[in-house]
Amino acid sequence: MNLPDTGQKRIVIIGGGFAGISLAKNLKEVDLQVVLIDRHNYHTFQPLLYQVSTSGLEPDSIAYPLRKVLKELDNFYFRMASVQRIDPDGQTVFTDIGNLGYDYLVLATGTKTNFFGNQNIARYAMPMKTVPQALDIRSLMLQNFEKADDCLDPVERKALLNFCIVGAGPTGVELAGAFAELKNNVFPKDYRHLNVDEMEINLFEGGPRVLPPMSENASKRAAEFLKALGVRVHLNVIASDYDGERLTLKDGTTLNTKNFIWTAGVTGAAIEGFATHVLVERLNRYKVNRFNQVEGYDTVFAIGDIAYMETEDFPKGHPQVAQPAIQQGELLADNLGRMLQGKELKPFTYRDKGTMATIGRNKAVADIKKLKFAGFFAWFIWMFVHLMALVGFRNKVVVFFNWAYNYINYDKAARLIMRRFKPKA
């Protein structure tokens, strides 16, 4: 790669998510050449992807240029590339645009969708981990409504208007709630000659309750909110197959649907090159110590969702959400400075700031330490926290304006098919 020799030690950060940019921003005072590699030239605020999928926001509201995020760093370099493999012994990163040596390496690659080995579901289901995938869901939804408005066959029309979401974690719950608000408030005005009541929203969860990571109270209230909005919640139900038109459940039940969205799980986006023993089986996350060093390597680190750190409070690793990633990035920046100065490293301790999910207008749940909130107050907290967490002043203003407009007018303005989505044959 075309990078200058500045005489500084080089740190290569792979991944521009919450963990990667948190680390890079805090390296401003550390004497290192910082190189960030990512497949995209922007950071995605993933908690609001579902709003792009459901026409609430345009993608540029939740994405921000990585070069602009880190413009204050003097010795910062960005390269848009896909990492193919790593040679940890030779301290080299191999990418599709060239190879790069490093003194320190940080893996902040996050997660990818986990289809649990089901090839048909992997082929035909709609995942939602990236901006292009969110736009695909938006296009498919609107295309199917356009088809339904002109469809004479009631069976075909029902499949076009049947939205099936597998996975009732925060993403699935928020997506189901957003679809329900479209059905109740927006689509009846857009499709006046279509019986929008035919639209079904089915949310499937393999466990006994929605929002498994949250408290029992949050799960109970979220289920109540969903049902009040008209979402059909199916618990202890597992999807076993999907062929692009027919969803088959484990008990043999089948549903015809042209809208099948998979939010049921993630797995670590590990990179080829490391010995298999450094990865946690099934989770595909790198084993790290309390300083986020990958097992067996002093100068290779993993932070965020890809890192698996066992502690007394979190014996199964930290939750794969934004806060652990941000906090690990901040501490690692400090520890790298200490390492260069020959000082003792500080162990990581996660400060849990709580978990929350929104289901719709005035409907949300929040677990903040021992406090449990539901309803309008939780919804207000959710909005404030997410608004403040967005990267960039412009994005904060645009999202706030959109939310205010949506709240006043019961409308979602981004109902645009910018590029047609073609389902796989």
Image (cartoon, rainbow, N blue to C red):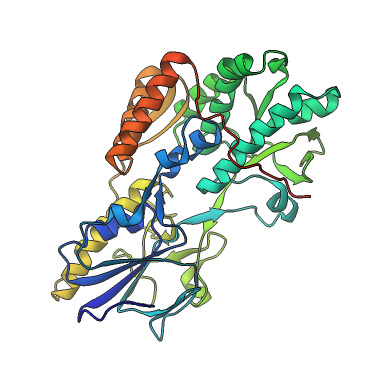
Q: For the point 85% across and 22% down, which residue is it?
A: 152
Instruction: Work out whether residue 169 can be spotted.
Output: no
Q: Residue 26: which quarter of the image?
A: bottom left
Q: Measuring from the top left, give residue 303's x and y in whole percent.
A: 36, 60
**Considering only vertical position in the picture, is 121 above or below 418?**
below
Query: In screen coordinates, is 6 left or right of 421?
Result: left
Count how many numbered circles sit on residues in the image: 0
Instruction: Work out whether residue 11 can be spotted.
Output: yes
Q: For the point 43% across and 24% down, which residue is it?
A: 364
Which residue is more in the foreground, 229 or 222?
229
Please identify the quadrant where the N terminus is shown.
bottom left
Q: Residue 403: which quarter of the image?
A: top left
Q: Measuring from the top left, give residue 256's x and y in whole percent.
A: 79, 33
Which residue is more in the foreground, 279 or 40?
40
Q: Residue furthest bottom?
A: 90
Q: For the point 32% across and 77% down, which residue is it?
A: 3
Q: Measuring from the top left, give residue 407's x and y in whole percent.
A: 42, 18
**Considering only vertical position in the picture, is 325 above or below 74?**
above
Q: For the point 17% across and 67% down, which residue is it?
A: 30
Query: In screen coordinates, is 150 left or right of 298?
Result: right
Q: Residue furthest front?
A: 418
Q: Measuring from the top left, give residue 103's x and y in whole percent.
A: 30, 79
Query: In screen coordinates, is 11 left or right of 179?
Result: left
